[in-house]
């Protein structure tokens, strides 16, 4: 074996030796990411998200496990308590998990976590399911009820949020915004279509 061949062999071995630590680091990262994802499915959002950059977590809403509750809470309390955890999560069209939400993704994830029930994914399919039960007078709505709005042309409904009481609701409004609480006045009052009782959603 000549000198040049030996040098090439040693260089190749050195490169391989350098690659192994990087592969181990990548493997460890992938394992940690998978563990984080499992925590999001299994545990309470606030506990699972501590110290975690949720923008790097990929979740499937279908796998979300319903919360277990240490104290007895009503259906309404469960929903309000859960949806409030997601204040500040960024809006993303098509977003359906705590990395980012759109309006219907937020309510779908919330009901999955509080009751283990998968509701229709879009406002259009929700309207098909519950439109016949929609009520008009928001003064009669209770916290936890779903509120619907028509914000696009001739669509019967195109936006949904969860009523909090006191003429307020929580929702994922639009691009470059976050999950937040808004008042049903001005624009939102003009666009309001009505509300669907939580008990109807959970049937």
Image (cartoon, grey):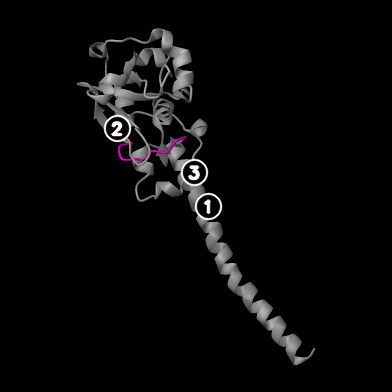
Pick whichever, 152 or 26, lies toward us. Answer: 152
Q: CA distance from mark 3 to mark 2?
A: 21 Å
Observer able to see residue 78: no
Write the residue at 54% across / 60% down.
Answer: 26
Pick whichever, 66 or 107, lies toward us. Answer: 107
Q: Which mark is residue 58?
A: 3
Write the residue at 72% across / 81% down.
Answer: 9
Answer left or right for 44 relative to 183: right
Of the numbered discs 1 and 2, the one sitting upstream in the chain is 1
Badge 2, how many Cα within 10 Å: few under 14, some, many 20+? some
Circle nearer the viewer, 3 or 1: 3
Q: Secondary structure at mark 1?
A: helix
Q: Which mark is residue 84?
A: 2
Q: Which mark is residue 31?
A: 1
Of the numbered discs 3 and 1, the one sitting upstream in the chain is 1
Answer left or right for 165 relative to 178: left
Pick whichever, 3 or 43, lies toward us. Answer: 3
Q: Secondary structure at mark 3?
A: loop
Q: Is residue 150 above or below residue 86?
A: above
Q: Position of residue 35 (x, y in %)?
A: 48, 47
Q: Is 93 included in the stretch rendered in magenta?
A: yes
Answer left or right for 74 relative to 101: left
Q: Position of residue 51 (x, y in %)?
A: 35, 51
Furthest-top residue in view? Answer: 132
Pick whichever, 154 or 156, lies toward us. Answer: 154
Write the residue at 24% across / 23% down.
Answer: 184
Question: What residue range appears in magenta?
Answer: 86-94
């Amino acid at each position: 074996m000549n000198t040049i061949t030996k040098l090439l062999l040693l260089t190749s071995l050195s490169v391989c030796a350098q690659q192994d630590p990087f592969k181990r680091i990548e493997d460890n990262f992938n394992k940690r990411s998978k563990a984080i994802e499992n925590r999001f499915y299994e545990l309470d959002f606030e506990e699972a998200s501590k110290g975690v950059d949720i923008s790097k977590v990929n979740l499937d809403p279908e796998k979300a496990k319903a919360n277990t509750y240490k104290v007895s809470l009503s259906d309404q309390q469960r929903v309000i308590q859960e949806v409030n955890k997601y204040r500040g999560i960024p809006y993303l069209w098509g977003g359906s998990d705590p990395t980012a939400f759109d309006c219907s993704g937020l309510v779908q994830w919330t009901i999955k976590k509080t009751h283990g029930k998968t509701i229709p994914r879009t406002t259009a399919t929700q309207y098909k399911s519950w439109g016949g039960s929609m009520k008009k007078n928001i003064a009669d709505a209770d916290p936890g009820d779903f509120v619907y709005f028509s914000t696009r042309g001739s669509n019967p409904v195109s936006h949904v949020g969860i009523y909090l009481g006191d003429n307020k609701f929580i929702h994922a409004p639009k691009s470059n915004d976050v999950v937040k609480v808004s008042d049903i006045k001005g624009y939102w009052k003009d666009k309001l279509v009505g509300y669907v009782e939580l008990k109807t959603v959970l049937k």
